[in-house]
Amino acid sequence: MSTLTKTEGAPVPASEETFLSVRDLQVTFSTEDGPVKAVDGLSFDVQRGRTLGIVGESGSGKSVTNLTVLGLHNPLSTTIDGEILLDGKELITASQKELEKLRGNRMAMIFQDPLTALSPFYTVGRQIAEPFMKHTGASKRAAWERAVEMLAKVGIPNPKERAKDYPHQFSGGMRQRAMIAMALVCDPDLLIADEPTTALDVTVQAQILDLLKDLQQEFGSAIVFITHDLGVIADMADDIMVMYAGRAVERGTVDDVLRAPQHPYTWGLLNSMPRLDSDIDTPLTPIPGSPPSLLTPPSGCRFHPRCTFQDRVGGTRCVDENPPLGPDRAAACHLTAEQKRTIFIEEIKPRLG
Ligand code: SF4
């Protein structure tokens, strides 16, 4: 896990053009035990040239949201409502054929484990060349040359030779680079990266994150970066959305949210992560309890069974009423703006150091 530092340096050039727009997304799975609403009323936008970091614990709905955007859910057991617009095109009602065309061409995904994306039976070069041939109609030779060029771009030494290797001949970090090359070979406008560096050691993790930033500068893609690690978000993202139990609970620019977080769950996440400047003996403070089952989610604010601030709201409002999330910079919590500010400054910030 990385520690929380905000990278200085040239900002990623931002365009205000919204490329992905999600509105009131609801994703429900049918299970033997009953319906599970994994995503409940989620709305967000991603602009070209910007990175949205989605953070939350396992089961918060962050990965489900992105598999839904890509159309990679099981249509037989999943019900989807709401709106997903990719450059103005509605994806929820798109056919599998249309989605297939968009995947790899206009949108691509980098997974946590490259072995889920790379086949052991084909050379790395062929696996990068094939989507390029499929989506652009390039010749075999031109696609192979493009694969070698992409391997060079992601920092694989001796790419001409290494393109002929099979995935098992690559190290973990090289496989991750190869998967990034595969995802970017058609210059997708939207790149979804789901915990792409979790399995890698810290040095390789930093190299891959730098590579993604460089490639975004070059290709101007919109990136959705999914992680449980706020340190990675601080390093990678322009905007942040914090998810809990299928809902967004806080959002804003990374600077705003990390400098002055407003939601008790975000406070808990910050409290539970190690910091570069803290004493090695300083104990981490985990959020009490565990995320709820979405088969029977808590009433009202879904965080209430784990929240130590509900007495400040008073009465049973936290248990009874779902706090709405406003537009732009917002936190879905019944505490008043003044309470959020004061609690953060007086009680949370001193603990963060
Ligand atoms: Fe805590 Fe209540 Fe705010 Fe939910 S609405 S985060 S329970 S204070």
Image: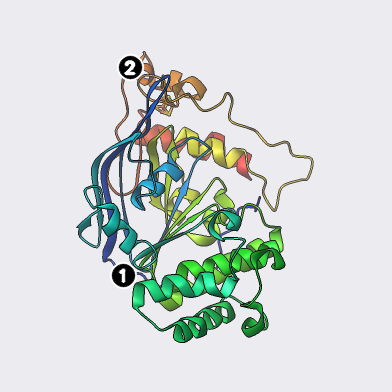
Determine the residue positioned at 74% across, 39% down.
Answer: 282
The answer to the question of whether label 2 and label 1 lie on touching residues, with beta carbons closer than 8 A, is no
The picture places residue 309, in percent across and down from the top left corner, at: 47, 24
**Where 335 falls versus 219 (above or below)?**
above
Q: Residues within 10 Å of mark 2 (few under 14, many from 20)?
A: few
Q: Nearer the viewer, residue 258 or 209?
A: 209
**Circle 2 SS class:** helix
**Circle 1 SS class:** loop
Q: Nearer the viewer, residue 94 or 28?
A: 94
The picture places residue 84, in percent across and down from the top left corner, at: 26, 50
Q: Is residue 112 visible?
A: yes
Q: Is residue 181 visible?
A: no
- Mark 1 sits near ligand 1, with its Cβ under 8 Å away: no
Amino acid carrying mark 1 in the image: Ser
Give the numbered dot on residue 155: none
Determine the residue positioned at 28% across, 62% down.
Answer: 19
The picture places residue 262, in percent across and down from the top left corner, at: 43, 39
Determine the residue positioned at 57% across, 60% down.
Answer: 119
- Mark 2 sits near ligand 1, with its Cβ under 8 Å away: no
Residue at numbered disc 1: 15
Identity of the residue furthest to the right in this view: 281
Q: Nearer the viewer, residue 240 or 120?
A: 120
**Where 89 falls versus 309 (above or below)?**
below
Which mark is first along the chain, 1 or 2?
Answer: 1
Residue 233 vs residue 323: left or right? right
| Picture quarter with ligand 1 | top left
Residue at numbered disc 2: 320
Determine the residue positioned at 29% across, 53% down.
Answer: 96
